[in-house]
Amino acid sequence: MEIPEVVILRLPMYVRALKQINKTDFKLVSSQELGKLLSITPAQIRKDLSYFGRFGKQGRGYNVNYLLDELKQVLKLDKQWNACIIGIGTLGRAIIRYPGFGPAGFDIVAAFDSNINLVGQPIRKGLIIQPITELCSTIKTNNVSIGIVAVPAENAQAVIDSLASCGVKAILNYAPISPFTHNGIVIRNIDPTLALQSMTYYLD
Amino acid sequence: MEIPEVVILRLPMYVRALKQINKTDFKLVSSQELGKLLSITPAQIRKDLSYFGRFGKQGRGYNVNYLLDELKQVLKLDKQWNACIIGIGTLGRAIIRYPGFGPAGFDIVAAFDSNINLVGQPIRKGLIIQPITELCSTIKTNNVSIGIVAVPAENAQAVIDSLASCGVKAILNYAPISPFTHNGIVIRNIDPTLALQSMTYYLD
């Protein structure tokens, strides 16, 4: 049975909320409580979780620790993932310094830029800017599964195509384009301008 | 008639694609062509646009320039919007330098941090870090409509509550939390960790 993508998109939010609850003394959580924390209806939460098994008894709530472990396993978050980043401008450097990736199990292990003047520069311990020509070999040698695209809009599609041809199956794209996707490759776009433009509709 | 939020969320993508087409010689675009560019079905595009009037003749396609103008008006993108940012760490500074906001009509006109050692520091021309105690007065004086939250997770809800109490109606949240929302306030979350965690499911 194929799980709808919208369900997969919500699971990381459940994981984050369960981690938060796990820091407290609460051992059980109801779909009502989870729903309140996440602004999702309890019915939606129960339906989403039912795809992956029976996690709770009616009226008793979910075991926080057990559900957290199971969801992490479903999402394959019980292991480390290696990522590379392409485009080491202001944005790329901020992404590399972003404190949220490491604790979540994501390591940026390689950095690339097409500007040969940047090549060889250290960004942080163990991370030196490489030429784009080493993309495929580095991805294979370092077991890189995820490509992070932080190049200007006009170069983004070419970089995404390169990542795909090097065998990367997951791409996090920060460039302001709607990329063409390749078969078997999953892509998420981070675009704060689109987010802003979808809010002004509601303003006076 | 209330427009579904999912429709509003897609309109900025249409605006971006139409701007791109507008730079070429093409004066007309079909829902098929737009759909290909955005990986959205033509039927979905036609349905989305039908909420706002009749923009195209069957089989003839949409007038690019006209549709672009109309959608910009619907989204209120035909004016400048002032934003403030709270949290001037690595992430906050990268957001301030992000090149995509200005051309889209969004100006960061005020910057705040709770660290008094940062207060008074210039970040760029015309932008000096202010104490958080000046949040409400600055928002009112500078006609700020949008708050950008770049503080650590543990402080984010309090900052969001402050923005709401100061009259801000749109919030772009970069902190890794699912914030409680206030009535009449629209919020979008930018969370690259959640995006990564929703991709590993598909990896081997």
Image (spheres, coloured by chain):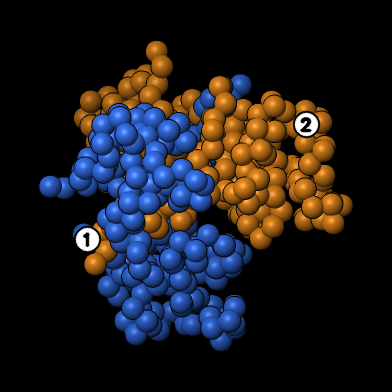
Chain colours: A orange, B blue
**Can you tell which mark lies on residue B77?**
none
Which residue does the numbered mark 2 point to in the structure image?
Answer: A136
Q: Which residue is most to the top?
A: A1
Rate crowding at label 2 as few (under 14), some (14 to 19) or many (20 or more) other CA atoms within 10 Å. some
The CA distance from mark 1 to mark 2 is 49 Å
Would you place residue B190 above or below residue B116 in this image?
A: above
The chain under label 1 reads B
**Given the image, on which type of amino acid does mark 2 rest?**
Cys
* Residue A82 figure quarter: top right
Q: Position of residue A155 (x, y in %)?
A: 65, 45
Tell which tag, 1 or 2, sits nearer the viewer.
2
Q: Residue at x 22, y 60 (%)?
A: B184
Q: Position of residue B12 (x, y in %)?
A: 38, 49
Q: Residue at x 41, y 45 (%)?
A: B27
Is residue A37 visible in this depiction of the protein? no
**Given the image, on which type of amino acid does mark 1 rest?**
Gly
Q: Which element carries disc 2, helix, strand or loop?
A: helix
Q: Position of residue A45 (x, y in %)?
A: 30, 33
Q: In front here: B38 or B101?
A: B38
Q: In front here: A17 or A136?
A: A136
Which residue does the numbered mark 1 point to in the structure image?
Answer: B184
The quarter of the image holding the N terminus of chain A is: top left
